[in-house]
Image: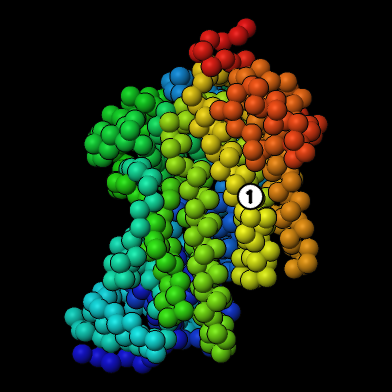
Amino acid sequence: MVKEKGYDVLIVGGGLAGLTLALQLSRTQPDISILVLEKRKENAPEATHKVGESLSELGSSYLRNVLDLKDYLSEHQLPKFGFRFFLSPEHTDDISRRVELGSKFSNPFKTHQLDRGLLENELVRRVQEFGVEIVLGAKVIAVELSKEKHLVQYEWDDTIHHAEACWIVDSSGRNSFLKRKLDLAKDIHHDINSAWFRLDAAIDIDNWSDDLQWRNFVDPGKRRLATNHLMGEGYWVWLIPLISGRTSIGIVADPKFHPFNTFNTFEKAFNWLEKHEPLAARILSAEKDKLMDFKVMKSFAYDVKQFYSSDKWAVAGEAGAFMDPLYSPGSDFIGLSNSWITDLIVRHRNGENIALRTLIYDLAHKELLRGWITLYKNMYGLFGKTQIMLLKIVWDWAAYWAIPNVLFNNNGYTNPEILKQYSTTHHGIGRKFSILNEHMQQLFLSWGEYAIESCSDKQLNIFDLACLHRLQSELINQYLPGELMPKIESNLKTLELIAAEIFRLVSSHIHDTPNNMHVDPYEMKLTDGKELLLHKSKSQQALAIDESIQMDIAKMWVVKKMTPTNELVS
């Protein structure tokens, strides 16, 4: 048995969450002593088979700006051409006829497609330059938590070692030892399954059609750089390029529509693709012999009772909670969680009492997760309803860029005064944002109960919507503490106008309410009926039409008028 020296921080798990935390801590306090215990015995191989290959804006901001990896990412990882959605599942055999939603030109804010193996090896190199000790091939055997020093026992090189640390952070993934030890597991009530595999081949979706007009909607090669989504009832399929010339393909499905046992092996997955995405199956079948690996995950979503403790422990990354890979939020939450953990550890090292701040951060994380999961819960049945999904994607993107990204990019989540203003009970902007988003998600679910005409042969540029282009373009802006909340409040007003216009348009088509009806997006519901809606439209809180927003949202409306009697009105 070997007794090791003590450390300021011991991180269990040397994947993306653990290594980025080690780098963030080291950049913030270069004299901090950190030990990282990682179970893999060697450097991560290229194209490591992990979820989290696609960066969204918040996660990209974390890696590029907080960790100063922008030069590395630009030189050694692929640029990402945003998210791209292929809807209209009635045309799964002809991609040129599917409604396509994405960017026509490069996105204003830079994001990336990640080869996780390459990135994690680079992170190892960087943290070691700061003096971080990394033990590969370490197996944690036991952990004793204490208010003074935590004691970790681990096996390495056939020898039992002991290490002490003031702080312990569990970033060991979904098999989190702290979650098991402290009984922190919690159900998130989102039962979705996934299978994914990688092919040693570059799959270019541009080649899926000979239609030159369709191809020329974007510059050659751009589509391949997007996170491409093939959407249908109860499922979505991803195609993500890797810089190594390989491609990641995944099936994510709700078992109410697609039982797990219909795609939980490679052969079954291909049979499933042949049935539900036949064009994709035909294209990919030519590369089947280049299979690198295959992985499944049943009921992948879960929650945790507590993220951070003033007893100097924390869970990070997938050791805490995981929701859904749609919109790629994994790296977003790594950035958020690591920033909260770093702030707590640094303040504790500086002699501050962190008890209240720990409670605030833990609550903020839980509230953010509670709001975020509404984007996914019970939504998979809508994925085959093209018109609903067009406006849901518009809303989800607008909400994401308008509030969480702006707060994170301006250190709002680690500023208790900002969080206090944001989260004040009943009247706080954060509370209003949460209620507004919940109402919008419920609108989409209620809308799904009505007849939806199929639609096809549309290619839509998301940034033709001036409001979305502005929200994403402004993510690079920095605000002083006194400017941040006014900006958040201004963005919330934009969201209110977007929500009101979406509701106005949907209600007009379903209930035949006036297309200039004033709308209170917090109170009016699709289930209210025409008379009640007209009554509510007269309240002082109801919003009049904003012509700019109206023009934007109209660009995403592609079907004819509907009635709840399942008959289309010509």
Residue sitting at x 33%, y 24%? 275
Residue 166: horizontal and vertical position, in percent? 42, 86
Q: How is the image coloured?
A: rainbow
Residue 407: horizontal and vertical position, in percent? 65, 60
**In the displayed image of the protein, which residue is found farthest to the right?**
547
**In the displayed image of the protein, which residue is found farthest to the top?**
570
Label 1 amino acid? Phe
**In the displayed image of the protein, which residue is found farthest to the left?**
158
Q: Quadrant of residue 232?
A: top left
Q: Which quarter shows the C terminus?
A: top right
- Res. 206 visible in picture: no
Which residue is disc 1 drawn over?
433
Q: Quadrant of residue 124?
A: bottom left
- Quick one: 356 or 453, which is closer to the camera? 356
- Quick one: 81 or 491, which is closer to the camera? 491
Residue sitting at x 58%, y 40%? 439
Residue 142: horizontal and vertical position, in percent? 25, 78
Q: Which quarter shows the N terminus?
A: bottom left
Residue 316: horizontal and vertical position, in percent? 43, 67
Please state if 428 lies on the left or on the right of 236 as rendered.
right
Q: Few, some or many C-alpha atoms within 10 Å of disc 1 (few <14, some 14-19, many ≥20)?
A: many
- Quick one: 141 or 525, which is closer to the camera? 525
Q: Which SS class for mark 1?
A: helix
Q: Is residue 544 above or below residue 156?
A: above
Q: Is residue 309 above or below residue 287?
A: below
Residue sitting at x 55%, y 63%? 364
Please state if 317 lies on the left or on the right of 107 as rendered.
left
Residue sitting at x 26%, y 74%? 139
Callout count: 1
Please state if 274 lies on the left or on the right of 471 as rendered.
left
